Amino acid sequence: MSDTADIDRIGDLPLPRERRRLVGHGPAEAHISEGFDLGRLHHAWLIDGPRGIGKATLAFRAARYVLSSRPKPPGRTLDLDLSDPVFRLVEGLAHPDFMLVRRAINPDTDKVRETISVDDVRRLSHVFGETAALGGWRVCVVDSVDDMTTAASNALLKLLEEPPRQTVFFLVTHQHARVLATIRSRCRRLTLKPLGRDDLQDVLAELLPQSAPADRADAALRANGSVRAALELIDEDRLVAVRKIEQALSQVLDVKSAHQFAEQMARKGADADFDAFIKVLRERIAQAVTSGVRAGVPLSALSRLAEFDVELAHDAQVTDVFNLDKKSFVLSALRRWARAGLPNANST
């Protein structure tokens, strides 16, 4: 399954299975390591939380910890001696008792499938139906359960209902509530929270030591606790674009300025800027709703904001699918933001 393993790579940065450290999730690591060390490891773990905060990294660290036959270092962490051969085996997806389930390549189109198929899951039955190759534990990481078809979810459920001996599943999900209820009921849930700003800057300094500290701090401030979001932001051009978007949403734009801004967001080859505009605006709407609730803003006004967010997401999808005019979309969004009657909203 190595042909599917790099689909989430950002540039030359390490994938979750290649990471040596995990920052900010000590309690979750302690739950897993303690269960294993005491011989009470649950057979299935559902690791949930927002995207990009380290869920897959935790799953791979847990997999290596369970698969390693060497004595574990003291402390309730999943740290291992870096010389342990299990590192390279799991990193290269070459460990005979480890399986990674995720979206596969469609051989007809040579593109990544949108879902995890039932066949992808059924392969586990063949592998786990045999004795462990190295005589110890077997581990499966599913990244993510959200991508499974209904048939694939049902096939996984059968494995969880009658788990093979000395086999553990680490299931990653970004949307816990959408996971099949019967799967949830058979898993021990580990909820990871977004990273704090200091932890996020620590990770960015490790991964991008050449980046400017001010840019790392700025990216950490805007990333909502997500390492992935921060890494995507820290590119200098992206940060410039996001700052420009936030400035446009925080001041009154005259008609000429609004059209100039919309043209920048909609120009050819600026898909990343257009996507960033939608993301930042939706974040502003969410923040406005939260602030409005605390300030006692009438529910009718908050409902209009919620409707705006839903319609914004829908219109963005329609604009993308049918290749509609992005400038018109941006101008319309700015006008609606202004009509929301919020402080600093634009007028076009």
Image (cartoon, helix red, strand yellow):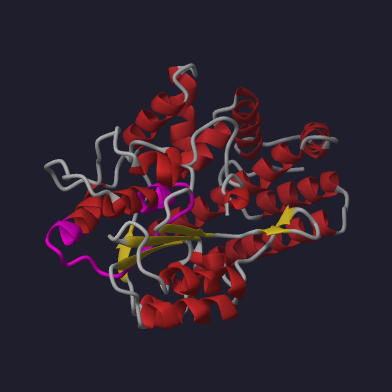
* Number of disc labels: 0
Please state, as top left, top right, bottom left or bottom right, where the C terminus lies in the image: top right
Between 203 and 264, which is closer to the camera in this rendering?
203
Q: Is residue 18 visible?
A: yes
Please state, as top left, top right, bottom left or bottom right, where the N terminus lies in the image: bottom right
Q: Residue at x 16, y 45 (%)?
A: 71
> Which corner quadrant of the image does residue 111 belong to?
bottom right
Whole-percent x and y of residue 108?
A: 80, 60
Answer whether residue 346 is magenta in the image.
Answer: no
Whole-percent x and y of residue 109?
A: 80, 57
Whole-percent x and y of residue 56?
A: 43, 51
Between 143 and 216, which is closer to the camera in this rendering?
143
Between 216 and 189, which is closer to the camera in this rendering?
189
Q: Is residue 62 left or right of residue 104?
A: left
Q: Residue at x 29, y 42 (%)?
A: 24
Between 323 and 64, which is closer to the camera in this rendering?
64
> Which corner quadrant of the image does residue 148 belong to?
bottom right
Q: Would you place residue 313 above or below residue 178 in this image?
A: above
Whole-percent x and y of residue 31?
A: 21, 58
Q: Please give the range of residues in magenta.
A: 34-59
Answer whether residue 57 is magenta in the image.
Answer: yes
Q: Is residue 224 visible?
A: no
Q: Residue at x 60, y 73 (%)?
A: 119
Q: Residue at x 88, y 53 (%)?
A: 324
